[in-house]
Amino acid sequence: MRKTKILLIPFIVVILISCQTGDKEKSQQETGDNKAQTEESTKKLTDEGLPASEYGFGDLPYAANALEPVINSEIMRLHYGKHHKGYYKKFLNALDSKSYERKDLAYIFSHIDNYDTSVRNNGGGYYNHWVFWKNLSPDGGDKPGDDLLKAIEEDFGSWDDFVDAFSEAAATQFGSGWAWLISDKSGDLQVINTSNQDNPIMSITEEQGYPLLTLDVWEHAYYLQYKNDRGAYIDEFWNIINWEEVSNRYEMALEGEYFMP
Ligand code: MN3
């Protein structure tokens, strides 16, 4: 009996030591995983590997995790890296496969009823996301500067009425689509929404105008983080709006110029 005990002790010690080493290895591996995850999420997302064209693409103007906690890096990597790049490639294919001339985007959109649906869907998907990425910023939020703020207050009654109108347009867009603040042809501000990848420049859109601000309300834009709570995503959006960019677009619109990627 005594002999068995003596033999067992070193055996148990060996087991204990090997368990501890295992834990240590495991936790080292976990630290490594976390580090890899952090590196992945702070990475700049680039347009590497995309075909060049006269329309251009470009890198995401901030890191994948820059808009956290409002939009997490997993969504940004998929949204920019898969969805947006996919639209761009399919847009070029759609033009080439039907031998359309590569006219400028404003021309194509304002004559979109003369084009194949694949140009409308993928051209819109390519353009709309650039409007969206660039009207977001990690330093965003608050309100626009004087000129645009004044125009908003005049055309919507008050800042709060504008926020309500835009949020309502985003919340009530049935299925996939976009909410927009536009400057219409007479220079008045309006809030509209569009289905699928349609946008305010397109000739098939009821209220046309210059896109100033947009919010992507497709499920791919928020579902991984907000699940079915589109309202929470819309509320958070106000914290990351790049009003400087939106104000620049307003100045351009008054000169008759569209924002272009
Ligand atoms: Mn999208």
Image (tube, grey):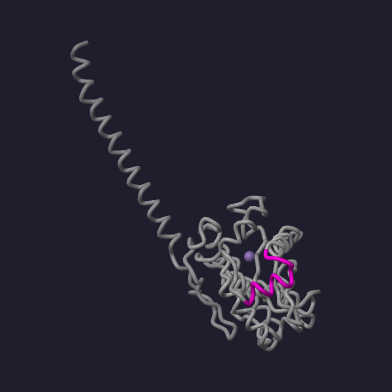
107, above or below 83, in the image: below
Q: Position of residue 173 (x, y in %)?
A: 75, 61
Query: Where are the magenta residues, as a range?
Result: 147-159
Q: Residue at x 58, y 52 (%)?
A: 225
Secondary structure of the magenta portion, mostly? Answer: helix
188, above or below 228, in the image: below
54, above or below 1, in the image: below
Quarter occupied by the C terminus: bottom right
- Please tell me whether residue 155 belongs to the stretch shown in magenta: yes
Quarter occupied by the N terminus: top left
- Please tell me whether residue 121 belongs to the stretch shown in magenta: no
Q: Position of residue 211 (x, y in %)?
A: 68, 76
Task: Locate residue 240 relative to residue 231 in the image: left or right.
Answer: left
Task: Locate residue 37 relative to residue 209 in the image: left or right.
Answer: left
Q: Position of residue 148 (x, y in %)?
A: 64, 75
Q: Most extreme residue toward the top, as rendered?
A: 1
Identify which residue, 235 or 56, lies in the foreground: 235
> Residue 171: which quarter of the image?
bottom right
**Quadrant of ligand 1 in image:** bottom right
28, above or below 187, in the image: above
Q: Position of residue 215 (x, y in %)?
A: 65, 65
